[in-house]
Image (spheres, rainbow, N blue to C red):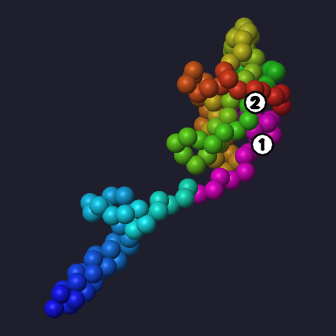
Amino acid sequence: MRRLALSIALAVSALALADCGLADSRTPLPLPGFLRAKPADPPPLARAPDVGKMVHEKLDSVFTAQSNPQNVRVSEAHPELRGRGWTACVKAELTSANGKPLGEETYRISIDDDVIIDRQRALPEDGCDTQSYRPI
């Protein structure tokens, strides 16, 4: 009789675990690590984009033509912290619409599928001041 009760208890436990795949970290049951489901590996990163080539070909996606960007330099691309794309920094000497020099400006660009999808003036937390740059 004990054997039958043990077999039923094991069968019920197996069915409970099979119902939800395997126990994972959100399971309220205290289970040993080998019974917990492994978290999925993040998808592999695509190759880093050629930032210099992209900015050279699409300079107008970073700077307006009126700003007359000179001495344009780019950093290497880094994986986006909160997404699947890449980020890089771009520096250039700019002029205002009335021709006055604005000095050097730095922008952080977001890249997805080899397309510049966003650009914003760099903030200290973007880390652009610690990057090394190469001319395009």
Q: Are marks 2 and 1 in contact (CB under 8 Å)?
A: no
- State the image quarter where residue 129 is shown: top right
Q: Is residue 61 left or right of residue 122?
A: right
Quarter-of-image position of residue 68: top right
Q: Name which residue lies at 52% across and 42% down.
A: 82
Please give the residue where the numbered disc 1 appears in the rendered image: 50
Q: Is residue 2 left or right of residue 120?
A: left
From the image, tell me which residue sits under label 2. 74
Q: Residue furthest front?
A: 2
Residue at 70 percent across and 11 percent down: it is 102
Q: Secondary structure at mark 2?
A: strand
Foreground of the two, 53 or 9: 9
Residue 91 horizontal side relative to residue 1, left or right: right
The percent position of residue 46, horizontal first and vertical second, equals 68, 53
Q: Residue at x 41, y 62 (%)?
A: 33
User: What are the residue bounds of the magenta stretch?
Assistant: 43-64
Disc 1 on helix, strand or loop?
loop
As for residue 46 lying within the magenta part, the answer is yes
**Distance between the Cα atoms at labels 2 and 1?**
10 Å
- The residue closer to the viewer here, 12 or 45, is 12
